[in-house]
Image (spheres, rainbow, N blue to C red):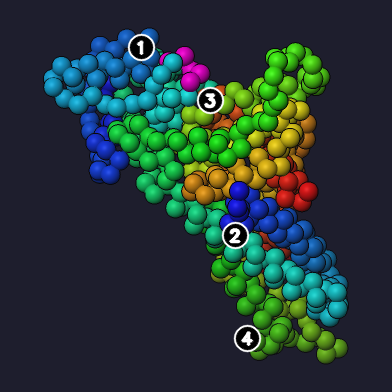
Amino acid sequence: MSYKPYYSSVTKKIIMSLMGLFLVTFLVVHLTLNSFLLFNNNLFNEGAHFMGTNVFIQIFQWVLFAGFAIHIFYGIVLQIQNWLSRPKGYKRRAFMEESFFSKYMIYTGLLILIFLIIHLGNFFFVKMGWVGNGVPLTSNGEENMAQLVRSLFQNGGFVAFYVIMFLLMGFHLDHAFQSAFQTLGLNHKTYWDFIKGLSRVYAIVVTLGFVIIPLFIYFKIV
Amino acid sequence: MDLKLKIWRQASRNEKGQFVDYEVHNISPDTSFLEMIDILNDELVEKGGDPVAFDHDCREGICGMCSMFINGHPHGPEAATTTCQLHMRKFKDGETIVIEPWRARPFPVIKDLVVDRSAFDEIIRAGGYISTTTGGVPDANAIPIKKVNADLAMDAAACIGCGACVAACKNASAMLFVSAKVSQFALLPQGKVEAKDRVKDMVAKMDELGFGNCTNTYACEAECPKEISITNIARMNRQFIGAKLG
């Protein structure tokens, strides 16, 4: 049998899941660095400096961008195919999805994409000097990323926006983590409940971690 | 029981359909869902109308022919039950019941509630078979098979190919059906000969026919009248990865 030149549905999904797990790992690294803000501004600045100058990180940054791009691209392609596969819908359709947030992945995903662009505009693009007035400096003349973050989160609107977007990301992650394992064929009745539990714990812990930082800054707890 | 029915009527494949309201009266709660439609059809025929076309055959829950989407669920609201095994006692007196055909691009409506499911046959033709030697009948127990694998293969083989998984899936994906058909062979020594080609060919055919992509919503498993497990989909994915890499 001859095969068409494009990837099969299962191959596309495997690529989606591998990129997704890569992004899941990235979020842990990102949250770890952010959490420095809760303890010490200088520690956060040093972390940001390391991420901004380390050669390995600089190269890996492009791998990360590619990971996002591939995940988003295939997510949209798969979704369009899925919409086309049912041209006429049902008059009455019960909620049958066992993984609750699985039904809304394209919507949470697209909102996260919008958030990602705004988030890059708030920090990364400022650091690169593409937008804004650059990163404020410390008394030693070094970049004060902590100050940039803290000044943004004095704005209640931004805090609310970030918190809502983090919650949407949490919904996305709740389905995403265990779904990736299923797609990669790693589902066995002996450990499947553990994977599902781990997926939920990951989604809750990561979401809470990201949420408390802008809230703590806004309410001057740290 | 008195019931209001909202049934999809469509004269033929290419004609536009619409919902038509009917009422049935004095239905026994012990009537099966298909018998209830039979009663409605008798009344329609007596009045000179066109009876509602629907698929059915064994009416014992094993043939996979019945296929109605009832009140938002394939095969109706009762879990692990085909439409023919569903009884009217599962509904309330005076209730309005919406009855629709399976909706999926590869399952076009032929008439009313009857859809063309030959797409499933095409997937089976692509790889749902094994090679075997001809000649005398071999001893059934000549090849040792682990009990756990025999059980899992039998569970997968319980799939009756009704298409409820496709009907339930928000993406009209056929992954549960295809994975059951892949698994029933993959778990047995007789199926190992074509294992790699089977999974690749059946997935390729599934894609070609226009079924959607699985997004692991697990609605298929929840709605399957034979309770086929999504672990079959994971097994198919493992097989697929192995076949592509190996």
Q: What's the residue at 69%, 71% (across, down)?
A: A65
Q: What's the residue at 51%, 18% (across, down)?
A: B62
Check disc 3 and report the residue beneath it.
B160
Q: CA distance from mark 2 to mark 3?
A: 31 Å
Please, what is the three-letter code of the amino acid marked with disc 1?
Answer: Thr
Q: CA distance from mark 3 to mark 4?
A: 60 Å
Q: Residue furthest front?
A: B135
Q: Nearer the viewer, mark 1 or mark 3?
A: 3
From the viewer's perspective, tell me whether residue A150 is left or right of residue A104.
right
Q: Nearer the viewer, residue B7 or B246?
A: B246
User: Which class describes the residues within 10 Å of circle 1: few (<14), some (14-19), or many (20+)?
Assistant: some
Chain designation of label 4: A
Check disc 1 and report the residue beneath it.
B31
Q: CA distance from mark 1 to mark 2?
A: 50 Å
- Find numbered disc 3 in the image and state the secondary structure of the residue it sits on: loop
Q: Nearer the viewer, mark 1 or mark 4?
A: 1
Chain designation of label 3: B
Check disc 2 and report the residue beneath it.
A6
Please, what is the three-letter code of the amino acid marked with disc 3?
Answer: Ile
Q: Position of residue B233 (x, y in %)?
A: 65, 38
